[in-house]
Image (tube, helix red, strand yellow):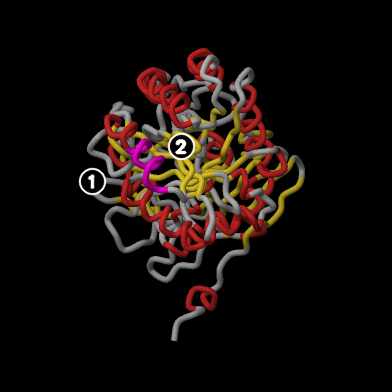
Amino acid sequence: MHAFSYTNGQLHCENVALQSLADQYGTPLYVYSGNTILDHYRRLDLALHGLDHEVAYAVKANSNLSVLRLLAQAGAGFDIVSGGELFRVIKAGGDPAHCTFAGVGKTREEIIYALQQGIYCFNVESEAELAYLNEVAKELGVIAPAAVRVNPNVDAKTHKYISTGKSENKFGIDFDAIEGLYAKASEQWKNVRMRGLQMHIGSQLTSVQPFVEAVKKVKPLAQALKDKHGIEFWSIGGGIGIVYHDSLASGQLHWWQTKEEESKPLTIEEYGASVVPLLQDLGLKILLEPGRYIVGNAGVLLTRCLYEKKGSAKTFKIVDAGMNDLIRPALYEGHHEIAPVIEKHGDFVKADVVGPICESGDFFCQDRPMPDFQPGDVIALLSAGAYGFVMASNYNTRPLPAEILVDGDNATLVRKRQTLEDVIAGEE
């Protein structure tokens, strides 16, 4: 379910017209559909029916407090990658006992904070980190729950910047070294308790096959660790992809799109039907760590067209959002559909949509056929709910945009737009 569609010629988020939000709160502006977020969480939870499981939302995808609170109230756990994300979860009403702490570079301060808050588990990514975790826990006189992230060397066939499951990636420990490391931990490090096993092969996977391959490869290892060391859970990671092409709720191609842009996404039902039968006989709690799937298509970035520049080689549509607001296209060639919030019919134009940042990489699309929107018009960059605001910056001394959460007919400001005074606060 994606709650963005045209009604009476205006693009809506649920029952709220996006033009009205742009007029009231200004642009650039992030808008999220609360009901889409909850629908995706519940579908994932249902897809794992028959397993002892928990859906642990990956906070890095979208960490707005109101988004976290929505998911905490729905019963989600949380996958965190910093002490700051743990702080956010707690502030939003989440339970630290349902948080797993991942990431290759946890600091002493973060480890102490997480131990004091009583998190469920540290997902450890190197032998050195496991030894250090034991050292810090010993100083505090506590036992640290730990799981090692195994690198199954499975090619997720996704963009190289979001592939994490191959031997050349920085994440995890080589498959062949895992059993020896668990044995070493059991014998030498008395202040860690090996609670589980974790893996994650990459993000934005649009085929179920890499998931199946990774589960089949790692399952015997999980069984052996359960038998020898009594582990309780296996986190199979996240990575379920979303639709970036043709991402309006109607599911129909619009007149400005080409047939080649059509996508056949991996459905959560297909994922569950393929993966759950492989896991049912293990007797381990299964954690799933989705981020993008839950929030990606639940958000848009609204931006207003400032100018049109027609050159001999290209037409440029210059908008007031920049790569500092949404960096995905510049960082890893991320695609976002572009839809005018007031529906347009008639001629279309091939153009680049670019922002005001003084970088050649500041673009949202290049040479793309699109409706011929004009200066003053507001457009929506779709599928911007994941890795949008969380990766935003103040580059070029630009204030961070505001964020809106929609529930049916109601739109709530869940983050105020930064002022210039906010941007320089803390500087001397």
Badge 2 amino acid: Glu
Locate residue 422, reporting x and y percent.
Answer: 54, 74
Locate residue 391, reporting x and y percent.
Answer: 44, 54
Image quarter for residue 48? top right
Considering only order in the chain, which callout, 1 or 2, is on the residue closer to the N terminus? 1
* Magenta residues, start to end: 181-189
Residue at (61, 43) in percent of width and height: 98
Locate residue 10, reporting x and y percent.
Answer: 64, 39
Residue at (69, 52) in percent of width and height: 93
Q: Can the viewer see residue 413?
A: yes
Which of the two residues, 265 or 236, is positioned nearer the viewer here? 236
Magenta region, main secondary structure: helix
Which numbered marker is on residue 313? 1
Q: Which residue is mark 2?
A: 337
Badge 2 marks a residue whose secondary structure is loop
Label 1 environment density (alpha carbons within 10 Å; few <14, some 14–19, many ≥20): few
Image quarter for residue 73? top right
Label 2 environment density (alpha carbons within 10 Å; few <14, some 14–19, many ≥20): many
- Inspect the magenta stretch and tell me whether residue 201 lies in it: no
In this rendering, would 39 be left or right of 189? right
